[in-house]
Amino acid sequence: MEFAEIKQLMREFSDLPITKLDLEWDKLKISLEKQVAGAVQTVDQPVTCQPITVVNQPPAVVLSDEDDCKARANETAVCSPVVGVYYSTPSPDAAPFVQVGQSVKKGQTLCIVEAMKMMNEIPAPVSGKITRILANPEEAVEFNQPLMFIQADE
């Protein structure tokens, strides 16, 4: 089993409703386990983070903390595909991948979310301009949590 296959397995495992997976392949043994806080939630089908685009809706004038996580008119949410730690830079002494107001291209790396010692690069789902960055560097993020928003190019 190649490293890329193991990495893909970890990504898919994080999206599944199961909490533990043990595999043996030739001489390779892999054990994956998720920490479950509080009650166990039953899911009938896998849940995936999809970019959220809101169209033809006026932007909110007054925002509460809860409203900060909602997409405004023509914004696309960039969500964390896994539970992990958010990093805005490729290394501690490097410049951030992106900043508010910066233009990005679809597929460009926006940030990294570390999960189980794997660095997951998060690509831009659309081309546009970064309007808000909600996640704080080196803080934990949840599955499907909005990390930032992109105002899509028209």
Image (tube, helix red, strand yellow):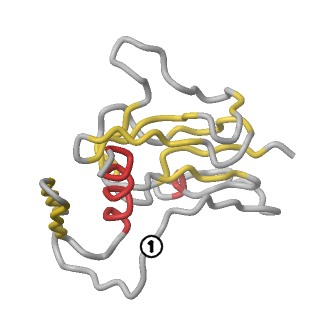
- Between residue 154 and residue 61, name the one nearer to us: 154
Please provide percent x and percent y for residue 122. 50, 42
- Between residue 30 and residue 1, name the one nearer to us: 1
Q: Is residue 119 left or right of residue 104?
A: left
Please provide percent x and percent y for residue 109. 55, 34
Relative vertical location of residue 11 with respect to residue 86 in this rendering, above or below: below
Crowding near pointer 1: few (<14 within 10 Å), some, many (20+)?
Answer: some
Count of marks placed on residues:
1
Please provide percent x and percent y for residue 32. 18, 60
Q: Is residue 68 left or right of residue 108?
A: left
Relative vertical location of residue 148 with respect to residue 13 in this rendering, above or below: above
Quickly name the residue at label 1. Answer: 47
Please provide percent x and percent y for residue 120. 40, 42
Relative vertical location of residue 1 with respect to residue 151 in this rendering, above or below: below
Element type at mark 1: loop
Relative vertical location of residue 119 with respect to residue 69 in this rendering, above or below: above
Residue type for callout 1: Val
Q: Name the residue located 30 percent from the left edge and 33 percent from the top edge.
A: 138
Q: Is residue 40 left or right of residue 59?
A: left
Q: Residue lying at the far front in this picture: please name it.
A: 26
Q: Residue lying at the far right in this picture: please name it.
A: 154
Q: Name the residue located 35 percent from the left edge and 83 percent from the top edge.
A: 43
- Between residue 19 and residue 135, name the one nearer to us: 19
Q: Name the residue located 20 percent from the left edge and 79 percent from the top edge.
A: 40
The quadrant in which residue 151 appears is top right
Q: Name the residue located 62 percent from the left edge and 42 percent from the top edge.
A: 124
